[in-house]
């Protein structure tokens, strides 16, 4: 039933206005810029140590070959170990990113509708969501790698549906992994052009203002690029459990 209702809202939606979405994004950003900054800082705090560790195999790669030249078994084992490390690092980075972005979207909804719920940046690290979070992260990473190997065009397409995974998961964490992916690609495909245009414009604006404010300013403005997709989801699907819900199935394209 949920899948059918979701798809019906997407299929029956009217056209969304680029300027209106952008204006609403700016208005919401004023309410959540601090939370966006905290999300980015938390992400960096967790991931940067792994970036530092990553230099260890690279350093070894420069030294070990001279020591093990002619020993193909050791060389292969070392390369396999480095590859395994990179895969594990990629999964961890993907899990952290998906969790914090989903938490940010949850906070966006709270601020947007004036809810008084406490900001919970680690909400999706809870036991009931962690397993699904890891599986989604692995699949998202796998799709991204596969699209990259198929050259640039497939990657340009999947980047939008994969971005909606954060939103669908954030507001429907009880749904199965397959449902979340299916619905993300459904709305991402339907709203691809609008979403891509908003990401390009919002990203350019965030970087321009951020650089004018130096590096710290860039961290403060970077989360603005996440908000247009939240507005699209809000206008397309809406939030049935919100008291001020004003969005219906007819507001979408």
Image (tube, helix red, strand yellow):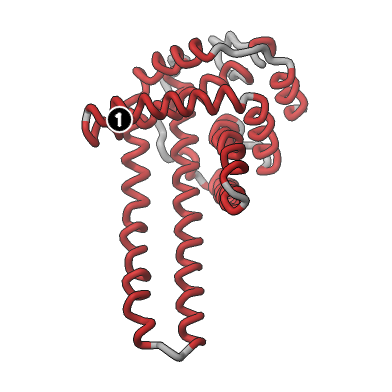
Name the image quarter holding residue 212: top left
Query: Which percent across, then down, holds residue 157?
Result: 61, 37
Q: Nearer the viewer, residue 164 or 135?
A: 164
Name the image quarter holding residue 6: top right
Q: Quadrant of the C terminus?
A: top right
Query: Which percent across, then down, holds residue 126?
Result: 50, 44
**Image: 47 above or below 160:** below
- Identify the residue shown where x is 64% and y is 12%: 15
Query: Which percent across, then down, holds residue 200?
Result: 46, 28
- Identify the residue shown where x is 47% and y is 85%: 74
Mark 1 residue crowding within 10 angstroms, few (<14) / some (14–19) / many (20+): many
| Total numbered labels placed on residues in the image | 1
Query: Which percent across, then down, holds residue 244?
Result: 54, 10
**Image: 45 above or below 161:** below
- Identify the residue shown where x is 31% and y is 48%: 45
Compared across the picture, whether 193 is left or right of 7 comes to left
Compared across the picture, whether 27 is left or right of 7 comes to left
**Image: 232 above or below 49:** above
Residue that mark 1 sits on: 220
Q: Element under label 1?
A: helix
Q: Quadrant of the N terminus?
A: top right
Name the image quarter holding residue 24: top left
Q: Nearer the viewer, residue 209 or 26?
A: 209
Q: Nearer the viewer, residue 89 or 132?
A: 89
Compared across the picture, whether 131 is left or right of 9 comes to left
């Amino acid at each position: 039933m949920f899948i059918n209702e979701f798809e019906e809202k997407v299929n029956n939606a009217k056209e969304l206005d680029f300027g209106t979405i952008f204006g609403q994004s700016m208005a919401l950003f004023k309410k959540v810029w601090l939370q966006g900054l905290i999300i980015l800082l938390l992400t960096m705090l967790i991931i940067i140590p792994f970036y530092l560790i990553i230099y260890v195999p690279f350093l070894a790669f420069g030294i070990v070959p001279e020591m093990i030249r002619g020993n193909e078994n050791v060389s292969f084992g070392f390369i396999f170990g480095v590859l395994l490390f990179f895969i594990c690092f990629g999964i961890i980075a993907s899990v952290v990113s998906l969790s914090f972005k989903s938490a940010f979207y949850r906070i966006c909804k709270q601020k947007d509708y004036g809810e008084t719920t406490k900001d919970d940046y680690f909400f999706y690290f809870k036991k009931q969501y962690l397993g699904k979070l890891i599986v989604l992260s692995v699949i998202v990473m796998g799709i991204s790698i596969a699209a990259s190997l198929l050259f640039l065009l497939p990657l340009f397409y999947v980047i939008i549906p994969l971005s909606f995974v954060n939103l669908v998961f954030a507001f429907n964490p009880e749904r199965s992994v397959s449902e979340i992916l299916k619905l993300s690609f459904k709305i991402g495909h339907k709203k691809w052009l609008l979403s891509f245009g908003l990401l390009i414009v919002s990203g350019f604006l965030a970087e321009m203002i951020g650089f004018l404010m130096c590096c710290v300013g860039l961290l403060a403005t970077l989360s603005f690029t996440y908000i247009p997709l939240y507005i699209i989801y809000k206008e397309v699907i809406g939030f049935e459990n919100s008291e001020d819900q004003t969005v219906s199935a007819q507001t979408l394209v």
